[in-house]
Image: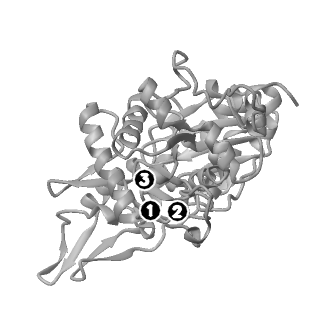
Amino acid sequence: MPLFEGLVGGGEKTAVVVDLGAAYTKCGFAGETGPRFIIPSECLSLSQAVRVVQYNINTEELYSILKEFVHLLYFRHLLVNPRDRRVVIVESVLCPSHFRETLSRVFFKHFEVPSVLFAPSHLMSVMTLGIQSALVMDCGYTETLVLPESFNCVPILSVWEALPMGGKAIHRELHSLLSEQCTLDTDSGTGLSLPTIPSEMLSDSKLYEFASFFSEKIINIRKRPAPPQDVEYPLDGQKILYVKGSIRDSVAEMLFEQDNEEKSIATLLLDTLVKCPIDTRKVLSENLVIIGGTAMLPGFLHRLLTEIRSLVEKPKYHDALATKSFRFHSPPAKPNCTAWLGGAIFGALQDILGSRSVSRDYYSQTGRIPDWCCLSIPLPDSVYEAGKTPPPLMKRAFSTEK
């Protein structure tokens, strides 16, 4: 539990903040500077790891998986009573409704939490910087999503861009290259082929090295510098895998290579800017926020900025974008924990959290949670409580007052 919480009487206990990612889940308490635990988003079922974030399975199976995983969070890692604390769930804006409904049913019906707040990850990331406008790119495990937050932190939902490129695609490509080109040395012989590749090895940053020092001149003449040196990667203490430098250099290039539709993660930012209102483009281009675990690759930001500056000179973007200034923010947390930190900041505002959350009583009456894509669900009474002045954040969000 948070430090000295037991010595303070009469106050509400701090909320639990959960960022349920496709690869890893960050969990901790509101008001803290970082998550207590970062664990894989999977649970063991019949001695086999099952992914928690799945959108293509039936509801009852998903309910069973989420119930087991949330039980793991509360009683093995956080060690708190779920009935005593509110919950802040940091989620993607594009999270399917059936997944949100199933997750809320797990928290309300099985663990009986007081309230749940679903906080958009892009908005939470902007809160850590104290700014009102930003173009946020979330480079996650399964996809890369770009969503602008315009003035007063209002998302422009009509211009979002996404691409199924992320850590999962890199792992798949690395697995293929290691199986085809790399050799293994053991006690029984040298130069052997690799039978299986451990999953934790694919996430090791030692195997990746971006060509982040590309200049525009090098890109234009289509020349590449010498690849990095080969790496001897130990396996199980008795095996050594020889990873070629060319693999380390080229495995992450797929993120910046354009497909048949001329799409890459660099073009996502520019395409989003082109679709934004013209009076917001300059502000958004100078407030770029990159989050997600894939963004932690060495040299990722430098390479992304180089690609953007090269693409913006092409006719497709040169005529549409007058601004040529692109600047990245440095959030007060690692890219994979930035959204969680924003949720922890928001969860520490107890007055705001109470008015924005969905209570257990409201859920027991309606059986559903409010969703931005479904207007038929009534909002909780706490949002428009009669006779009370809404808190400042609510006034900015639901009125036109300055």
- Give the residue number, with chain letter if any, for mark 1: 38
N-terminal label among 3 and 2? 2
- Give the residue number, with chain letter if any, for mark 2: 35
Q: Identify the disc placed on residue 71.
A: none
- Give the residue number, with chain letter if any, for mark 3: 82
Q: Identify the coloring.
A: one colour
Q: Between residues 96 and 355, which one lies in front from this camera angle?
A: 355
User: Residue 314's image quarter?
Assistant: top right
**Depth-wise, is mark 1 or mark 3 nearer the camera?**
3
What residue type is disc 2 on?
Pro
Determine crowd level at label 1: few under 14, some 14-19, many 20+ residues with C-alpha closer than 10 A. some
Asked whether residue 154 is in view, the answer is: yes
Seen at 75% across and 41% down, the residue is: 285
Seen at 52% across and 37% down, the residue is: 359
Asked whether residue 223 is in view, the answer is: no
**Which structural element holds mark 1?**
strand
